[in-house]
Amino acid sequence: MSDDEPKLDDIARQRVVPILRVFDHELARRFYCDHLGFTWQWEHRFEPDLPVYAQVVRDGAVLHLSEHHGDATPGGAVMIVVPDVQALHDDLIAQHHPNSRPGLSDDAWGRTMTVTDPFGNRLVFWQRS
């Protein structure tokens, strides 16, 4: 098992695996892996020319990304608990991504950073207070 794979205790603790709708798996891979630091763990297609269903992981967080129209509605949101949202923010800002320059917010429930993916889904990275 690689360091990027979720461990059994991470999976048991998460209990829910959100499915986010994506429209282009290559764009999704670049955004989620190259920009956000997730690992593209696996993907599935029923046939070579059919939509992709994939799993990405980062620090114990597991997300499913689906090109299938019936799996999810674009524009969903998920909260992902991270140990240091400031460090993640600094890393993302240093990349100078043309479509992703998130800010930080100090809320009653902790510090958050919202990133919108190219498909309109919102990922709220949350450091609990």
Image: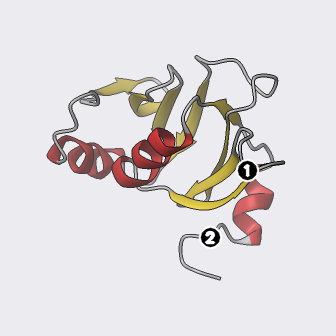
- Residue bearing mark 2: 5
Q: Position of residue 82 (x, y in %)?
A: 47, 50
Most foreground residue, 129 or 56:
56
Query: Does residue 129 show up?
Result: no
- Residue bearing mark 1: 48
Q: Residue at x 22, y 37 (%)?
A: 97
Q: Secondary structure at mark 2?
A: loop
Marker count (numbered): 2
Q: Residue at x 19, y 47 (%)?
A: 95
Label 1 crowd bin: few (<14), some (14–19), many (20+), radius 10 Å: few
Q: Secondary structure at mark 1?
A: loop
Q: Position of residue 64 (x, y in %)?
A: 69, 44
- Disc 2 residue type (three-letter): Glu
Label 2 crowd bin: few (<14), some (14–19), many (20+), radius 10 Å: some
Q: Left or right: 4 with respect to 72?
A: left
Q: Position of residue 56 (x, y in %)?
A: 60, 53
Q: Which label sits on residue 86?
A: none
Instruction: Specify the quadrant that holds the C terminus.
Output: top left
Q: CA distance from mark 1 to mark 2?
A: 26 Å
Q: Residue 19 falls in which quadrant of the image? A: top right
